[in-house]
Amino acid sequence: MGIGDWGMRFVQLLPITHYRLPITYYLLGEEIMLGTVTVKKFTIDEYEQLGKLGFFERDRVELIRGEIIKMVAKGTFHSVCNSLVFGELYTLVGKNAIIRGQEPIILPSDSEPEPDVVIAKKRSDNYSLSHPQASDILLVIEISDSTLNYDQKTKLSLYAESQISDYWIFNLVENFLEMYSEPYQNNQGNFGYRFKRIVLPNETVSLPCFPDLSLDLSQVFPRQN
């Protein structure tokens, strides 16, 4: 069934409540008459077409391994940290790369996440012709409070599988930076990173893509007292 066919029959996006956030939106399938629900896996093209048709006007969503995920509302600390990280990196990196904030990236496994911050290679069209792909990405950053478990597991595995060399999580629950590097696949077929480094909010860290540039974490972690 093409997107035009099931798009017209997309009568209701049913939020299935999970213990863990974010919430996944599932397409109701033919088996609904039997009391079951079929999960529709979306390609990137189908997902983007749904966006053009206006299905996501009221929600911020992203595509993760073919599933449409509703993104959790941002709290105050998340918003403050996100803005400060973006501003500091923009000032540090200048014209050496492109800093993107909460914008889509294209990954191989039918995924179009929207990380909080991305440092991407410079490109003459400034990514107006297509979103950055894994080979364009120098660093992915997530700001994590209520989504910490999701960012440490689902997002980490996704970025490692896509061979994104460096992934940072600003952990606002425990108040430190988690730096991950060197993606790998273990004997069970799971993806992760070989190295994890913890950096405290009063310390300074070098950018992996520009080792001569340093980010002062005291300038980006929100004061919680």
Image: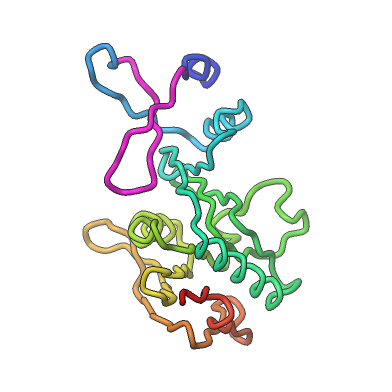
The x, y position of residue 140, in whole percent, is 52, 64
The vertical placement of 18 against 99, above or below, is above
Out of 208 and 26, give the one closest to the viewer: 26
The x, y position of residue 27, in whole percent, is 40, 25
Taking the spot 46% from the left edge, 68% from the top edge, the residue there is 167
Taking the spot 46% from the left edge, 17% from the top edge, the residue there is 11
Say whether residue 132 is left or right of residue 75. Answer: right
Q: How many marks?
A: 0
The vertical placement of 216 against 127, above or below, is below
Range of magenta residues: 11-30
Say whether residue 87 is left or right of residue 11. Answer: right
The x, y position of residue 100, in whole percent, is 64, 59
Taking the spot 45% from the left edge, 56% from the top edge, the residue there is 162
Out of 24 and 118, give the one closest to the viewer: 24
The x, y position of residue 225, in whole percent, is 46, 77
Q: Quadrant of the N terminus?
A: top left
What kind of colouring is applied to the model shown?
A: rainbow
